[in-house]
Image (cartoon, coloured by chain):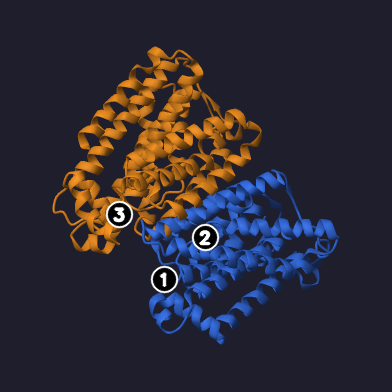
Chain colours: A blue, B orange
Amino acid sequence: MMELLPQALTDGILLGGIYITIAIAFSLTYGVMHVIDFAVGEWIMFGAFTGYYLNKWTGLDPFLFLPVIFVLYFGVGYLIQPVIHRVLSGTKGNPFLMGLVFTFGLAIMFRGLALTAFGFYSNSIPSAFSEGSFDLEPLGLTVTIPTVRLVGLAYALAITLILHYLLKKTNFGLGVRALAQHKDAAGLMGVNSKRTGSYVYGIYVGISAMTGVLLGCILSIGAQMGNEYTIFAFFVVVLAGMGYLAGVPWAALLLGLVQSIFMIYFNPSHTLLAVFAILYIILLISPRGLFGKGV
Amino acid sequence: MKNRGATILAIIGAALLILPLVVHDTFVLRVLTEGVMWIGLAIAFDVIAGYTGYLNFGHGAFFGIGAYTIGILMMQANLPFWAALPAGGVAAAVVALIAGIPTLRLKGAYFAIATWALSRAIQQLALNVEFTGGPDGMRLEAFLNPQFFYYLMLITVGATFAILWYLLERAPFGLKLKAIREDEEGAKALGLNPTKLKMQSFVLSALPTGILGGIYAYWITFIDPSSTLGDLVSDQAVVMVVFGGMGTLFGPALGAILIFAFKTIFWAYLSDFQLLYLIILGALIAISVIFIPNGLWGTMFKRKADATRPQHQPEPASEPAALSAVAAPEEGN
């Protein structure tokens, strides 16, 4: 069993790398809009299916469509956000509760739509990278790295760096960070919370959809895949500490490791239980995340 | 208003009690039994969601836990139904207690998604362990007496309604929960213990749900992870309460009746399009949130006026007085 450990660790790190992209975008949206989006897994699922069908119709590699999918879903997110904003800035009832309920309703609707359109079967997206793999035999390690997972990691790094640049070096990023700190004060300083929120939500939906394509190439796609990824996204954000972006990569890597270790050593269908158990213990011991820096 | 309301309630109660004597159609009785059950599930959900302001998106987990507890106790421990039934409620309450300890200390968003994750995890557990029968589910001893189940469901739901009505609308407990919903820090400053109160309301919400799950299991005689622990139970509870009106007892009951009636008609005529039902449920939640954030009941009777601002009455005043006191300035806006 021990000889499988290096392989499990490698798989986990490569998978965790991809989760970073979802979790950062998810965390960013929470920071700006102060609402958890229950539909995160459904955006991933929609992206994956878009990639699947584009590949089927054109025969081109799904990776070529990533920019197209980003632009498409950026538009969708940009158009949906004003509705969420309206719910959140309502005066009747409890806007925060309503925001949560609203995204929950969206998630149910999207899942129903996907099941209607795509059925219950699951598939995987073929890509030029799906076949090849690197062997680390010469280095004395019994580890095989599928090319597609390596590409996935490169993608994750690129997205993370771009988001980092956007947040730390541009005026737009300054506005986003200001909004996350204090919404009213940011508004007084001339940050348009409505428009910035739309951009952030669009970016988040776009990234989630793109990541869905990668997950579809590496693992599989199905109309019910969204559930799992919503829980994963939440897991990463809570482990990192809500709103603490710097903790996200570590939490995402941990999630990848948990998942791959369960796939190799235990029953993979117990992954969710393990994830929940870890979540439970972390919330019990350190409610503000692994690093104690969440809000 | 109060007297008229009581009269209407008494008439409805009496009508429901004598109904099985008039109606002999088993199908109608079956539909009514399930409708009554959904009223119970919706008002139990509303205790934590509407009154306390903590959304539990995994309410179905308690229903399933109750169902499975009774199934296991009756079929594997050979306990009689009456001995197993309270255990179903207790099991749900204990799970609520354990799950609530870390999550209820935190903000609502954690709780909402953690309860949802818990319900997914429990469903996965039921699918993978031996003693639940896994994906094949579990058969219970059949007891085919529709009248018995109708009355059992009616009495359970009626008792739940009466107890919750007393606790939430008459006793100070309801006001304390509302205080937490409006301003948790403020409630703490007034000397309330929000963590304890939230735990109490979560357990209060889980207990009747578990019992109803148990009755359901014995009534339907077959339970499996997708029918009792699946998303649909939680999703329907959410839509009933949001559509009917959160933070009241009549709102969820009204929502439960309307949504369940719709579901029955939909499944009777459009059973080929079951997935469409999921889409409609989701769309209904989203649309209710946008257009009737106070739900049907709240919009019709403007009872939710007290939801937007804290009540300042030193002691629980009677409903109409409290209503006019806070509703008056609201009208001017």
Between disc 2 and disc 3, the foreground one is 3
> Are marks 1 and 3 in one subunit?
no
Circle 1 is placed at which residue position? A292
Q: Which numbered dot is residue B139?
A: none
Q: Which numbered dot is residue B307?
A: 3
In the structure shown, which secondary structural element does the residue marked by tag 1 occupy?
loop
Circle 2 is placed at which residue position? A37
Q: What separation in Å lies between label 2 and label 1 (alpha carbons)? A: 23 Å
Label 2 crowd bin: few (<14), some (14–19), many (20+), radius 10 Å: many
Amino acid type indicated by mark 2: Asp
**Image point 84% across, 64% down: which residue?**
A60
- What is the quadrant of residue B332 in the picture? bottom left
Q: From where the camera sits, is residue B52 visible? A: yes
Q: What separation in Å lies between label 1 and label 3 (alpha carbons)? A: 34 Å
Q: From where the camera sits, is residue A20 visible? A: no
Residue B52 horizontal side relative to residue A227, left or right: left
Amino acid type indicated by mark 3: Ala
- Quarter that holds the C terminus of chain A: bottom left
> Which is nearer the N-term, disc 2 or disc 1?
2
The residue at the far left in this view is B314
Q: Chain of mark 1?
A: A
- What is the quadrant of residue B165 in the picture? top left
> Are marks 2 and 1 in one subunit?
yes
